[in-house]
Image (cartoon, helix red, strand yellow):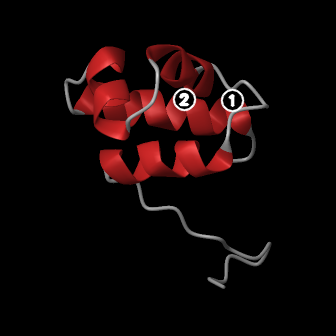
Amino acid sequence: MKIIDGKSFGAAVRTYRKEQNATQVQLAAAANTGVRFIGDLENGKPTVQLDKALRVANILGMNIEALSSKGESK
């Protein structure tokens, strides 16, 4: 899944969470965040904290990789 903005990142988080049959409450508890943060993240709120967002992605088993515009891993 290509992530180009907060909305697409949030959609990916939601997809991964649902694939694992986890609720927002369960994910918030596992990531030590509030349920509101999870909702904001999944809705693509542009001001969510990056460190928390990456922690959530890690808990969900998402693989985050930076690629150049040519598709090369950095």
Say which amino acid is labelled 2.
Answer: Ala
The residue nearer to you, when weighing 65 against 31, is 31
- Which residue sits at x=66%, y=83%? 72
Tag 2 secondary structure: helix
10 Å neighbourhood of mark 1: few (<14), some, or many (≥20)?
Answer: some
- Which residue sits at x=68%, y=73%? 67
User: Badge 2 is on which residue?
Assistant: 11
Decide: is 70 above or below 20: below
10 Å neighbourhood of mark 2: few (<14), some, or many (≥20)?
Answer: some
User: Badge 1 is on which residue?
Assistant: 7
Say which amino acid is labelled 1.
Answer: Lys
Q: Where the C terminus falls, by quadrant?
A: bottom right
Q: In the rendered structure, are the residues bearing label 1 and label 2 in contact, judged by CB atoms less than 8 Å apart?
A: yes
Residue 66 placement: quadrant: bottom right
Left or right side of 27 for 2: right
Tag 1 secondary structure: helix
Q: Where's residue 49, x and y in %?
A: 67, 40
